[in-house]
Image (tube, grey):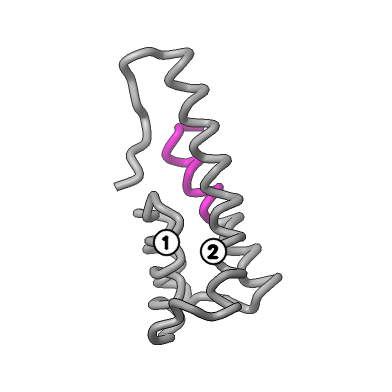
Amino acid sequence: MSQRDDRKSDVQRLLDELCIKLGFCLPPEENRRLRESPPGEVDSFTDAVFKAEGMGDMSYTDLRRQVREVVGQHLSRWVETDSQELETRPGERSWSPH
């Protein structure tokens, strides 16, 4: 399985967790869009989730904090995985967060 497929699976696990834990069950098209091109920063991904849900500015709410926490946990694992790959294959980067 390629790194891109792994990342898509990682994003799907993140979206599944947001749906189960916090009720953010995105429409299929938005789910696919985030799997295909996930924002690489916690705040950007969190904003994309709220936008996909059709919610306005949620900058200072407890719900945003909760979503951000779940996103942050997953993104930190992606960074660890990417760092490990860079150590084993110097000069290569198989996934870009942008």
Q: The residue under label 1 is which amino acid type? A: Asp
Q: Taking 30 as reference, is 13 left or right?
A: right
> In percent of the image, x 43 and y 56: which residue is there?
35
Element type where label 1 sits in the image: helix
| Nearest the eye: 90 or 2 | 90
Q: Taking 70 as reference, is 84 left or right?
A: left
Q: Which residues are magenta?
A: 1-11
The residue furthest right is: 21
Vertical side of 62 occupied by 35: above or below: above
Q: The residue under label 2 is which amino acid type? A: Arg
| Nearest the eye: 32 or 42 | 42
Q: Position of residue 88 (x, y in %)?
A: 48, 13
Element type where label 2 sits in the image: helix
Vertical side of 35 occupied by 97: above or below: above
Q: Which mark is residue 43?
A: 1
Residue 43 in which image quadrant: bottom left
| Nearest the eye: 74 or 36 | 74
**Is the stretch drawn in magenta largely helix, strand or loop?**
helix
Vertical side of 17 occupied by 53: above or below: below
First along the sequence among labels 1 and 2: 1
Kindly check if marks 1 and 2 are in contact, taking CB atoms under 8 A apart as contact: yes
Q: Position of residue 18 (x, y in %)?
A: 61, 68
Q: Position of residue 66 (x, y in %)?
A: 61, 69
Please check the rendered image and state whether residue 36 is part of the magenta-colored stretch, yes or no: no
Q: Mark 2 highlights which residue?
A: 68
Whole-angstrom CA distance, mark 1 to mark 2, is: 7 Å
Vertical side of 90 occupied by 78: above or below: below
